[in-house]
Image (spheres, grey):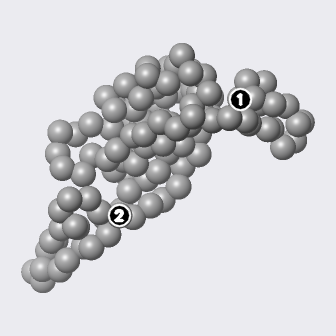
Amino acid sequence: MKLITAVVKPHKLDDVRAALETFGVTGMTVTEASGYGRQKGHTEVYRGAEYEVDLVPKVRLEVVVEDGDSADVVDVIVKAAQTGKIGDGKVWVTPVETIVRVRTGELDGDAL
């Protein structure tokens, strides 16, 4: 099993979620996040005043899938989240050793 973690722009969350549901992903965890990449934030204008945005708002999405589906799920996330502009986000994949469903005690594949 693999844990796929993606950090994407907040306005792309609905697109990514819909694409994952179409692919057959049944569960995910979403959290709000803030951060910056190479640009170290950006400058915006509000009511004529310019100000620095040091931490850019993002959404962190986590999905656990079977090993064989991980490359396809990453591809689905990337295609749905892509805008072609700086700050689209990142996706990374981490191996998962064990999963336990708290309610029933089911393990690994059964817990998905």
Mark 2 lies on residue: 35
Name the residue furthest top. 68
Q: Residue at x 39, y 40 (%)?
A: 91
Determine the secondary structure under disc 1.
loop
**Numbered label attached to residue 17:** none
Position in image of residue 15 (x %, y %): 39, 36
Furthest residue to the right?
104
Q: Which tag, 2 or 1, sits closer to the chain's start?
A: 2
Name the disc covering residue 112, or none.
1
Q: Can residue 79 be seen in this view?
A: yes
Q: In this view, does 95 lie to the left or right of 92?
A: right
Q: Is residue 3 above or below residue 9?
A: above
Query: Is 10 on the left-hand or right-hand side of 2?
Result: left
Is there a contact, CB below 8 Å, between mark 2 and mark 1? no
Assign a secondary structure to mark 2.
strand
Q: What residue type is labelled 2?
A: Gly
Task: Give the percent coordinates (x, y) of residue 7.
Answer: 40, 48
Residue 23 higher or lower than 18, as above or below: above
Q: Position of residue 39 (x, y in %)?
A: 18, 62
